[in-house]
Image: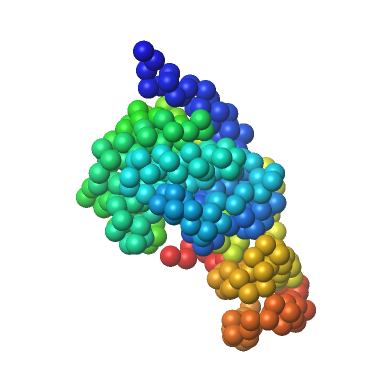
Amino acid sequence: MPSFFERNDLERKRRELRELYTRAEVLLSPMAGVTDLVFRGLCREMGADVTFCEFASADGILRGNRASEELLELGPDEHPVGIQLFGSDPEKLAAAAREAEKLGPDLIDLNFGCPVKKVVRRNGGSALLCNLPLMENIVRAVVEATELPVSAKTRLGWSEGELNYLETTQMLQEAGACAITMHGRTRDQRFGGVANWEPIAEMVQIAEVPVIGNGDVWSGADFLRLKRETGCDAVMVARGAIGNPFLFEEIRAAVEDRPYTPPTVARVVDVLLEHMDREIALKGPRTGLNRMKKHFACYLKSCPGVSALRKKVFVSDDPAAVRAFFLDYRDQYAGLSVGRPGGERAA
């Protein structure tokens, strides 16, 4: 009788992800309310090698929830791309993985790291750091359910006094995970404090699968330092890219040892408006503009004289008026550099 590894063709699946993360160094993390089809496309154009959809609930997928389906929209040429799922029921997650596979992603990722209360209360995300046997059952069930490689994204542990990242690493790879992303924070830290990268280096020493480092990558220099200090196979960028898809250009310049010039106000506004136009084309004027409003403040965070502009933009429901406000602002500040769009090291 074939073993679990043979039955699920794990040698082939692991080879695929090992080859992927040999040539793909920088990944865009799944982020709720951020990494929709449009934003992923912008980040790819700026240099992201692999992108992930917003994480989706297994329950929502199985109910045929329209909002969940929209989270999983993939572009016709969007590869490599991953779909991330969360939940706490192995059978439901396995069924959701089968549905997600039909959409054509390159891998399925499992969320064992989200610290948000509404996810944790449902025993999902980082709650599973307190229940490794259930986490193992989930991974095994999903691995059995799909022909795609399965990876997992997690954290160092529930709290500083409950670090279990090495135990989690060993369990995940034995359960069939083909890559592991580690965010260098505990659940208790949420997104505060400073990410601890040392445990990621420890993971690299024991892992038989690719390790992706995550946490506090705000610049090209941060990317290089995380790679150098941990030896991780790839780096996943999260909050640093919100309002700053240019970060992927900065990382590319750092990797290639080229000088990097931060964007001018004119370029930030041009990209912001392109982002808005694509959202409106995809979702319609009202929904598209509403989705953009959470991005506007992030794009403009490091720009000069934005408080008056922000007030006008956020009270308007007219895309044409919003565009005019931004174009007037661009004309006023066109040549100025904004330093690092999106803000630096924001909690």
Residue 288 visible to an observer of this rendering: yes
Residue 215 visible to an observer of this rendering: no
* Residue 239 percent coordinates (x, y): 50, 59
Left or right: residue 76 compared with residue 64: right
Looking at this view, name the residue that lies furthest to the top: 1
Image quadrant containing the N terminus: top left
Left or right: residue 343 compared with residue 190: right
Q: Nearer the viewer, residue 83 or 264?
A: 83
**Residue pictured at 60% horizontal, 52% vertical:** 73
Q: Nearer the viewer, residue 310 or 200?
A: 310
Looking at this view, name the residue that lies furthest to the front: 63
Whether residue 303 is situated above or below residue 224 in the rendered picture: below
Q: Nearer the viewer, residue 78 or 309?
A: 78
Image quadrant containing the C terminus: bottom left
Left or right: residue 37 compared with residue 147: right
**Residue pictured at 37% horizontal, 22% vertical:** 4
Whether residue 253 is situated above or below residue 177 in the rendered picture: below
Whether residue 82 is situated above or below residue 305 in the rendered picture: above
Q: Nearer the viewer, residue 266 or 310?
A: 310
* Residue 314 percent coordinates (x, y): 59, 81
Count the labels in the image.
Answer: 0
Is the image coloured rainbow, by chain, by secondary structure, or in one colour?
Answer: rainbow
**Residue pictured at 39% horizontal, 60% vertical:** 191
Quarter-wise, where is residue 50 in the image? top right
* Residue 333 percent coordinates (x, y): 73, 78
* Residue 228 percent coordinates (x, y): 50, 40
Whether residue 54 is situated above or below residue 94 in the rendered picture: below
**Residue pictured at 54% horizontal, 48% vertical:** 52
